[in-house]
Amino acid sequence: MAGTFRLSFGPWNIHEGGDPFGPTVRGGIEFAKKLECYKQLGFDGVQFHDDDAVPDMNDLAPDQIVAKAADVKQLLDDHGLAAEFVAPRLWEDERTIDGGYTSNDPACREFAKERSRRTIDIANALDTKLVVLWLAREGTYIREAKDSKIAVDRLVEAINDMLAWDPNIKIAIEPKPNEPMDQAYIPTTGHAIALAYLTDDPKRVGVNIESAHAILAGLDPSDEMGFALACDRLYTVHLNDQNGLKFDEDKSFGAVDLRRAFNQVRILDEYDFGKNGEFVGLDVKAMRTQRTDVATKHLTNSRQIFLNLLELARSLDKNKIDQLITQRDYEELEMLIINHLMGK
Ligand code: XUL
Ligand code: MN
C-alpha cells in the first residue's frame, strides 16, 4: 500500500524578504505565531536552527539553554507538532568568519564544536534525534587559504565529537557546492557520504539533500537521492527548485522544472521514504515581491505540487514503462512521461 508523507519546513521559510541588496519588505512574525500556522498550512514537522529554538544561546549556560528548549517543546506539543531536526547556525558569529570546524584558528574551531554540543542538547530537549549540518563556511574564497586535506580531517574530528557527545543522535550533512563560499569542501551527496565513512560511526551519518543545492552542483536531485538511498543514508530532504546556476533561489518545489520535481517525488515514493519516520522537508522562500498577507503561498503551493506529483507518480503505467525499457525505446518512454505530466 502506498505510504503517506509527513511534511516539514523551518521558521526561516516564513521570512521578511530581505536580501543582500535590500532591506526587509514584510513585517516580522514572532516564532510562536509562526507555529500557529503550521497545521493550517498542512505541515506536521518543524525544522530548527539551534537559535530558532533558543535565541541568543551564546549568552546562556548549558542548563539555561536546555530549559528554554523545554519551553519550545511544550509549545510544539500544544500545537500537535514535532521537531524534525536541529541545525547549528555556524555562519553568523564572528568566531565563524573563517569557517567553524575548518577555521584556521583553534579557538574558533573549539567554539564551533562547543556550539554543536549545545545544538545536540537542544535536539534532545525537543525530542528529535536528528542534527542537520549545512557546512556554510567550511570552504574557501581562495584555494591557498586552507589545506583541503586538513579541512576534511577537521570535519571528521568535529563530527566524531558530536557522535561521542550523544550516542543516539544521527547527523544529516546538507551538501552545497558554493554560496557563501567560492568552493565548499562538501559540495555533493557523494562527498558527504564519503565523509560519513571516515567517522567513528558511519551508520549514524547521512545526508539532507536539497534540490537547489544539487542543481547548483550541476547534478540531478533525484539521482542524488537514489545514491543516498542505495547507501541507506537519506535522512531527510529539502525540496525546492532552482532556475539555473545563479544564487541559491529556494524557489517553490516544481516551479522551474516539473519533470525534475516529478522524478524526485517518484524516487522518494518508490523506496517508501518516510517509513523510518523521516519527514519530507521543504526549504523554500517567498519571493521578495510577495505581500505579507499572501506570503505563505510558496509553502502551500510546494506542498500541493508535491501531492499532485505523487498522484502522477502513482498512476504511471508501470507495465508500459517496463515494456518500453525492454524494447529500449526511450523516445517513446520520454513521450509517455511528458504526456502523463500534461494529463494526456
Ligand atoms: C542554505 C540552506 C540552509 C539549511 C539549514 O542554503 O539550505 O537553510 O537548509 O541550515
Ligand atoms: Mn536547505
Image (cartoon, helix red, strand yellow):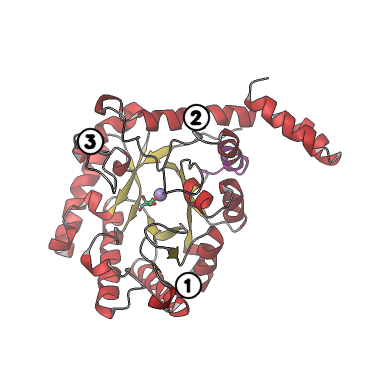
Nearest to the observer: residue 292 or residue 172: 292
On screen, 281 above or below 93? above
In the picture of the structure, the residue carrying the numbered disc 3 is 25
On screen, 164 above or below 250? below
- Choose mark 1 or mark 2, whichever is in front: 2
Residue type, mark 2 in image: Ile
In the picture of the structure, the residue carrying the numbered disc 2 is 305
Left or right, 328 with reference to 303 = right
Quadrant in which residue 94 is drawn: bottom left
By secondary structure, the bulk of the magenta-drawn segment is best described as helix
Residue type, mark 3 in image: Val
Residue 199 shows which numbered tag? 1
Circles 1 and 2: CB distance less than 8 Å?
A: no
Circles 3 and 1: CB distance less than 8 Å?
A: no
- Quick check: is the Cβ at mark 3 less than 8 Å away from ligand 1? no
Farthest front residue? Answer: 21
On screen, 244 above or below 207? above
Q: CA distance from mark 2 to mark 3?
A: 27 Å
Please provide percent x and percent y for residue 203. Answer: 51, 64
